Image: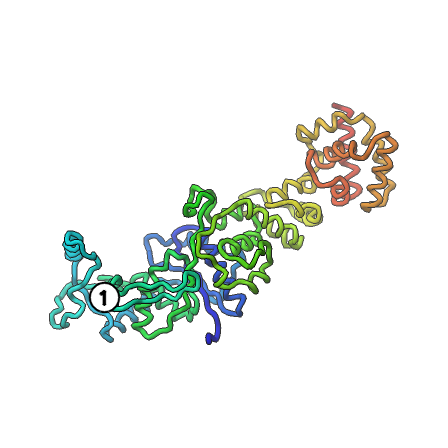
């Protein structure tokens, strides 16, 4: 029985946080958080030529946006190189690894001969069982001694038992000729030293598990629970790539998707809990398990993402939503809201968030609360105002000045005014929308009036009436 679940996310800092990587991080986060465990973050920066501080920063920012908090400090794999090499030398001293002096030309020649003979090109080093006394004074790599017979079984929580014939495993290099450790060794040592109990990662790493198990077994370490999850495909059934549009987590933030909606969608992408589509973080942490992950690649569907995002926007706390929108504006490099605009936006949130699927949509609806007088109506709104008689908006003003500024009172006043004009309120709605927002599509007239308040509402009606008289 495991004392505590420990998962990890271990991205390579060679670019942005890919949406597939974001889902892998999310699955690890959910599994640990739902069991009171630890979720660790390791940056696999051993490839010094391709790893950049900018990429590391992008990964951290992407995880911060998604709300995937990790335990402890961020671990650098590169900084553990001495420890990785120490394990290789330990295996060497135990006789479970050996020095191989074969050159690249000799290895290439071996494979050419094997290929010509129709045999396996898996390299068999002549130095595996050589007497140390025969070792030359020459560069060498350190290779692990792979098992020669039998099978290795990967007990995978998603893929099931996967059996690999040991004669298909090569004597994997642990240390290069310059003494630096290879990635495959570093991963195992880091996971062991970090106490990782569950390795949840993409199924493109499935074949690596058998090779990594050689190190676990040789060192007498506990093998973690494996869970190799299928990759994400586009709607065309092909592996998600640049041709499918946005790929990085931060791109989705800059497009205006709420983090909660993205978490919900990515959790559901390849995992299921009955027929549940919409759920909260608390439910996801409670429900998430490895058995619910499917074996087939999941297809990224923007319409489903937007649908879930809309549902999350609708239930969000107004203040929290305002802060997330401000972060979106920064990510999208759009002008920030003033303090007044931000406050007005939060006050208007109740009538904005029910039907918006993204933040740009919500801000479009919120324009009436963010714009300052004098309002310049768009083409459709101007047309609605031009059909209004010169005095109708002026005539409405006294009725509103004397009304209590509640929804019921405003509805009663406007309906009474419409009746007095020999029409119905629906006929007044278009010019009122145009006067209050300068647009033809807005929240309800009553909601706008309540958000704007008496003084601002009357001022906008007065501006529109003056504009009508002078047009």
Residue 384, position as x, y percentages in the image: 73, 28
Name the spot of residue 72 as percent of width and height, x first: 48, 67
**352 sits to left or right of 432:** left
Residue 390 visible here = yes
Rendered location of residue 238, percent (x, y): 41, 45
Q: Which residue is mark 1?
A: 142
Q: Quadrant of the C terminus?
A: top right
The quadrant where residue 224 appears = bottom left
> Element type at marker 1?
strand
Asked if residue 239 lies left or right of residue 90, the reply is right
Residue 393 position by quadrant: top right
Which residue appears at 76% of the width and 24% of the height? 470
Measured from the top left, where is residue 364 in percent x and y? 63, 40
Nearest the viewer among 166 and 330 is: 166
Q: Residue furthest top?
A: 471
Q: Quadrant of residue 316?
A: bottom right
Q: Compared with residue 259, is residue 422 higher up or lower down, i.e. above or below?
A: above
Q: Where 413 sits versus 130, above or below?
A: above
Residue 17 seen by the camera: no
Residue at 83 percent of width and 27 percent of height: 391
Q: Nearer the viewer, residue 448 or 80?
A: 448
On the rendered structure, is 142 left or right of 113? right
Query: Alpha-carbon neighbours of circle 1 within 10 Å: few (<14), some, or many (≥20)?
Result: many
Residue at point 39%, 71% (across, down): 193
């Amino acid at each position: 029985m495991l004392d505590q679940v420990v998962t990890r996310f271990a991205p390579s800092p060679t670019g942005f946080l890919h949406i597939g990587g974001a889902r892998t991080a999310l699955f690890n986060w959910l599994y640990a958080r739902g069991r009171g465990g630890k979720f660790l973050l390791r940056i696999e920066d051993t490839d010094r030529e391709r790893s950049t501080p900018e990429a590391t920063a992008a990964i951290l920012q992407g995880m911060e946006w998604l709300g995937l908090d990790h335990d402890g400090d961020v671990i650098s794999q590169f900084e553990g190189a001495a420890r990785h090499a120490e394990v290789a030398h330990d295996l060497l001293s135990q006789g479970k690894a050996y020095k191989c002096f074969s050159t690249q030309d000799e290895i290439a020649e071996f494979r050419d001969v094997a290929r010509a003979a129709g045999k396996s090109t898996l390299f068999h080093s002549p130095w595996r069982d050589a007497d140390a006394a025969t070792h030359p004074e020459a560069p060498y790599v350190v290779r692990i001694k792979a098992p020669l017979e039998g099978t290795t079984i990967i007990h995978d929580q998603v893929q099931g038992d996967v059996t690999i014939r040991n004669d298909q495993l090569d004597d994997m290099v642990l240390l290069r000729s310059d003494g630096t450790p290879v990635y495959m060794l570093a991963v195992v040592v880091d996971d062991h030293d970090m106490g990782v109990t569950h390795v949840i990662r993409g199924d493109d790493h499935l074949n690596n598990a058998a090779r990594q198990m050689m190190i676990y077994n040789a060192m007498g370490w506990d093998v973690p629970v494996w869970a190799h999850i299928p990759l994400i495909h586009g709607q065309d059934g092909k592996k998600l790539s640049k041709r499918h549009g946005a790929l990085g987590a931060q791109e989705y933030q800059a497009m205006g998707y709420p983090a909660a909606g993205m978490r919900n969608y990515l959790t559901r992408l390849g995992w299921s809990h009955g027929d549940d589509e919409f759920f909260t973080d608390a439910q996801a942490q409670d429900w998430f398990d490895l058995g619910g992950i499917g074996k087939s690649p999941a297809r990224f569907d923007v319409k489903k993402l937007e649908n879930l995002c809309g549902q999350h926007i609708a239930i969000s706390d107004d203040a929290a939503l305002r802060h997330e929108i401000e972060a979106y504006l920064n990510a999208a490099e759009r002008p920030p809201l003033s303090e007044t605009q931000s406050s007005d936006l939060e006050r208007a949130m109740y009538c904005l968030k029910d039907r918006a699927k993204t933040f740009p949509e919500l801000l479009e609806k919120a324009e009436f609360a963010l714009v300052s007088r004098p309002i310049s109506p768009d083409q459709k709104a101007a047309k609605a105002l031009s059909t209004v008689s010169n005095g109708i908006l002026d005539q409405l003003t006294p009725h509103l000045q004397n009304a209590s500024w509640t929804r019921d009172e405003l509805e009663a006043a406007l309906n009474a005014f419409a009746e007095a004009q020999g029409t119905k309120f629906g006929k007044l709605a278009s010019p009122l929308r145009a006067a209050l927002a300068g647009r033809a599509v807005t929240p309800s007239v009553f909601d706008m009036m309540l958000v704007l308040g008496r003084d601002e509402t009357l001022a906008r009606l007065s501006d529109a009436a003056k504009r009508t008289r002078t047009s």
